[in-house]
């Protein structure tokens, strides 16, 4: 149980915000591909007294006394993560996926070194070299993207890596609906003598369940968030099988770029990793992929274009060119109808990123609620209705979504308000 009464007693204003957000999560269909709902045990651990403890350093080597129990929590998180991903060394302290990526660059490279990453406009992440991000400011990023078919252009990856003598190659994406060929990335990295870093933030859960190939045999280092398909608390993590790299990474995380780790979040990571080690979690990941495939088919059968004509994973990118509705407008209309998603650029789209021609949707959160193929067909048809009929469809879709979310309760009876 999460008891919100103490908050109500001491801060009614904030209490009301928390209750409204709970209601929003319960009443909306959550299609943001990077979001999920943690279990009640994970939510409970994230809100515990472990937030009170400073523990700079690592288990058995801290700069503070009183760390015996938080050491145990961090060791549980590390051991479980090693088992989940079949790796030798794990750092569970990064506060986020962005921190984890920056920490890897900081550990293996010097300022100004050349890194090859996926273009943000083609599905990469801000920390893969965007000029407005620290990554793009500190390092000489060069980029690759996808071809007209929507698949990563591996010839371009090799050409740009070779021409620019990249010291590190980043594989991984935030808006790429297709499987990534890590072996090919390794071969290219070997040809140019570069490190290979794979950012699996989006697909970590799929990898655990064998629904996407694992990069651990190919990458020098793997980064992830813990809150997307992995369904843990918000946070980051870095993994490697290379002892020397592991030492450099530990130094880059602390004291290099962080101070005190968030021990309540590290304990919540341990909790979520225990859940991820179960067969039930594997079934959940399979269902995410099945749901995405049915949602994609429903949309395409209804005449909606998807970038790369479908999906291999948990997400898809709706190509709105020619529909008369922009990504920003669609995000707004869906919001009004209780469907949450995010506008997104379409590769080679000349529209502004603030009003792009795409919308990204994914199935991890709706699958956590227990929704299966039938629900995906309803959601797909609701999206089609909104794209085709815009404002006129909002009330109709709202009603259908209300009926749907009532059948799949979220945190029912888990909160004392
Ligand atoms: N912000 C995340 C996403 O939505 O994909 C990436 O870290």
Image (cartoon, rainbow, N blue to C red):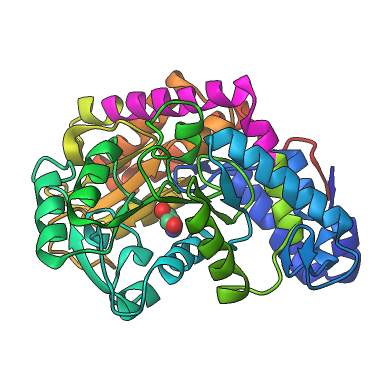
Which residue is located at x 80 percent, y 55 percent? 71
Residue 282 falls inside the magenta stretch: yes
Is 308 displayed left or right of 45 in the figure? left
Considering only vertical position in the picture, is 295 above or below 257? above
* Residue closest to the far front: 244
Percent across and percent down for residue 213 are: 37, 31
Stretch in magenta = 272-297
The image quadrant in which ligand 1 is located: bottom left
* Main secondary structure type of the part rendered in magenta: helix
Asked where in the image residue 292 lies, by quadrant, the reply is: top left
Up the image or down, 286 lies above or below 244; here it is above
- Label count reads 0
Compared across the picture, whether 186 is left or right of 267 comes to left
Give x and y (percent) for residue 395.
43, 42
Residue 152, can we see it? yes
Front in this rendered view, residue 260 or 32: 260
Q: Could you say which quadrant of the image residue 301 lies in?
A: top left
Q: Looking at the image, which residue is at 38% across and 56% down?
A: 332
Is residue 396 part of the magenta span, yes or no? no
Residue 349 shows in the view: no
Which x, y percent locates residue 68? 88, 57
Query: Can you say which quadrant of the picture contains the N terminus?
Result: top right
The x and y percentages for residue 280 are: 62, 21
Residue drawn at x 16%, y 42% is 150
Q: Residue at x 45, y 33 (%)?
A: 207
* Closer to the camera in the image, 406 or 62: 62
């Amino acid at each position: 149980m999460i008891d919100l009464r103490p908050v109500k007693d001491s801060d009614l204003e904030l209490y009301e915000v928390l209750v409204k957000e709970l209601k929003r999560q319960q009443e909306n269909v959550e299609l943001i591909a990077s979001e999920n709902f943690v279990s009640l045990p994970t939510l409970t651990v994230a809100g515990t007294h472990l937030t009170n403890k400073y523990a700079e350093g690592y288990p058995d080597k801290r700069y503070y006394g009183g760390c015996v129990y938080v050491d145990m929590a961090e060791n549980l998180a590390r051991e479980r993560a090693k088992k989940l991903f079949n790796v030798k060394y794990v750092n569970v302290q990064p506060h986020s996926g962005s921190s984890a990526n920056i920490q890897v660059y900081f550990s293996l490279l010097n300022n100004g070194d050349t890194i090859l990453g996926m273009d943000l406009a083609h599905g990469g992440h801000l920390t893969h070299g965007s000029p407005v991000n620290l990554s793009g400011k500190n390092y000489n990023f060069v980029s690759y993207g996808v071809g007209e078919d929507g698949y990563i252009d591996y010839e371009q990856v090799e050409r740009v890596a070779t021409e620019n003598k990249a010291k590190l190659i980043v594989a991984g994406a935030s808006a790429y609906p297709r499987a990534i060929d890590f072996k090919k990335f390794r071969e290219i990295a070997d040809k140019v003598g570069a490190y290979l870093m794979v950012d699996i933030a989006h697909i970590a859960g799929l990898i655990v369940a064998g629904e996407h190939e694992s990069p651990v045999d190919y990458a020098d280092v793997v980064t992830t968030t813990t809150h997307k398909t992995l369904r843990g608390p918000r946070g980051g993590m870095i993994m490697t099988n290379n002892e020397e790299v592991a030492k450099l990474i530990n130094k880059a995380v602390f004291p290099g770029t962080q101070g005190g780790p968030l021990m309540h979040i590290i304990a919540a990571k341990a909790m979520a990793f225990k859940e991820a080690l179960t067969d039930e979690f594997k079934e959940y990941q399979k269902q995410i992929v099945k749901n995405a495939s049915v949602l994609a088919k429903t949309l395409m059968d209804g005449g909606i274009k998807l970038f790369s004509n479908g999906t291999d994973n948990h997400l898809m990118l709706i190509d709105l060119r020619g529909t008369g509705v922009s990504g920003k407008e669609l995000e707004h209309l869906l919001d009004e109808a209780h469907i949450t998603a995010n506008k997104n650029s379409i590769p080679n789209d000349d529209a502004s990123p603030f009003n792009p021609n795409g919308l990204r949707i994914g199935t991890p959160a709706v699958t956590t609620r227990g929704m299966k193929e039938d629900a995906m067909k309803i959601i797909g048809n609701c999206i089609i209705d909104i794209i085709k009929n815009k404002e006129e469809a909002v009330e109709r879709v709202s009603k259908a979504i209300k009926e749907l979310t009532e059948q799949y309760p979220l945190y029912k009876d888990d909160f004392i308000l």
